[in-house]
């Protein structure tokens, strides 16, 4: 694993003048990603917070070339870039598709699935603030049970889609989950993905203080609580073999997990949400744990 000192020494890829909200963890995530992947990167970014905060065209606060593309098209555009690089004999440049959960779990899913099935050479990061944030925090397929959004004012009913497991079924070289509160884990996963050919997928939980309604200074703490409560499981799969990441290993034992209520207490999106919905969230989390740990056992 890279050291914190090593991360700090890497060149800054997000330049002054960006328009991210205070406490935005997805911009922090991209900062880590570009530090991890180096300067020889081309990005494909669909409509999402990142395309907004990077600055008004033709200005960009992101230090690598970015193709801003239609909402559903991050993976297809990245496939095109990857194919063009291949045709030019360029094996060095990393193609990074960087998209929100709305653009990945919902509208871009067919494009991602196609690119994954073809095993097109790219790293696809779905940063998830668990909603369509930049258009006013609507529910996405990744919104957890009970969460209030502008389209679920009484709390989200039903279960989210687990896009990481959906991608895992595509038999990919690399699939992982990460969280912006754990940069070393994320960076290590990105660097591992970068050494592999084909389609690599990372789901990055990125708490959003605006959408989740918590104070900006709590961004890192909230992300940690997501992992410590077991709500977000950190794992990776190399060629299909799933294993829990060290940071999540101890939470395999439910008794070691912090209560879900502790993770939710500072999030305004859960304020006043009934016990039945919180229970549904806990049931969903327990179900996810049983799937991941079963798959990890089979992989041993
Ligand atoms: C086809 C289409 N529908 C709707 C929009 C409007 N739109 C732009 S970004 C966005 C939300 C993006 O949500 P997400 O992918 O979760 O990224 P985030 O904003 O949370 O970063 C929407 C609905 C659009 N650009 N194109």
Image: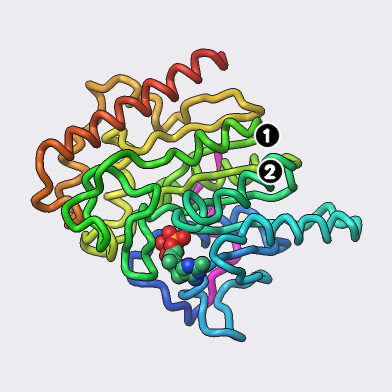
Image height of 253 relative to 130, above or below: above
Q: Residues within 10 Å of mark 2 (few under 14, many from 20)?
A: many
Q: Residue at x 25, y 48 (%)?
A: 156
Report the quarter where the N terminus lies.
Answer: top right
Residue under label 2, please give it. 199
| Residue denoted by label 1 | 173
Which quarter of the rendering shows the C terminus? top right
Residue 18 vs 106, above or below: the answer is below
What range of the chain is rendered magenta?
A: 1-15
Overall secondary structure of the magenta section = loop
Q: x and y percent of residue 140 in the render?
A: 38, 53
The percent coordinates of residue 125 (x first, y second) are 55, 51
Can residue 26 be seen here?
Answer: no
Q: Secondary structure at mark 1?
A: loop
Q: Residue at x 58, y 79 (%)?
A: 60
Residue 202, percent from left and from top: 54, 44
In the rendered structure, the answer to whether residue 111 lies left or right of residue 30 reads right
Residues under numbered marks 2 and 1 in contact, where contact means CB atoms less than 8 Å apart: yes
């Amino acid at each position: 694993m890279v050291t914190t000192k090593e991360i700090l020494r890497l060149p800054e890829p997000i330049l002054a003048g960006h328009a991210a909200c205070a406490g935005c963890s997805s911009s922090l995530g991209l900062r880590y990603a570009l530090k991890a992947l180096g300067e020889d990167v081309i990005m494909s970014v669909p409509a999402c917070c990142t395309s907004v905060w990077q600055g008004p065209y033709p200005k960009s606060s992101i230090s690598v070339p970015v193709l801003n593309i239609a909402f559903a098209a991050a993976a297809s555009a990245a496939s095109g870039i990857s194919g063009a690089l291949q045709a030019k004999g360029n094996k060095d440049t990393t193609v990074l598709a960087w998209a929100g959960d709305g653009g990945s779990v919902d509208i871009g899913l067919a494009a991602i699935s196609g690119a994954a099935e073809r095993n097109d050479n790219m790293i696809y990061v779905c940063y998830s603030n668990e909603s369509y944030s930049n258009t006013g925090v609507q529910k996405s397929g990744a919104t957890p049970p009970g969460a209030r959004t502008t389209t679920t004012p009484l709390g989200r009913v039903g279960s989210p889609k687990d896009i990481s497991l959906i991608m895992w079924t595509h038999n990919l070289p690399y699939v992982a989950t990460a969280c912006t509160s754990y940069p070393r884990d994320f960076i290590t996963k990105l660097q591992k993905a970068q050494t592999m050919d084909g389609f690599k997928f990372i789901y990055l939980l990125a708490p959003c203080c605006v959408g989740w309604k918590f104070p900006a200074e709590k961004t890192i703490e909230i992300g940690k609580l997501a992992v410590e409560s077991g709500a977000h499981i950190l794992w990776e799969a190399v060629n299909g073999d799933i294993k829990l990441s060290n940071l999540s290993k101890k939470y395999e034992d439910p008794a070691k997990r912090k209560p879900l209520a502790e993770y939710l207490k500072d999030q305004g999106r859960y304020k006043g949400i009934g016990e039945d919905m919180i229970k549904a969230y806990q049931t969903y989390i327990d179900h996810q744990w049983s799937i991941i740990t079963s798959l990890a056992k089979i992989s041993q």
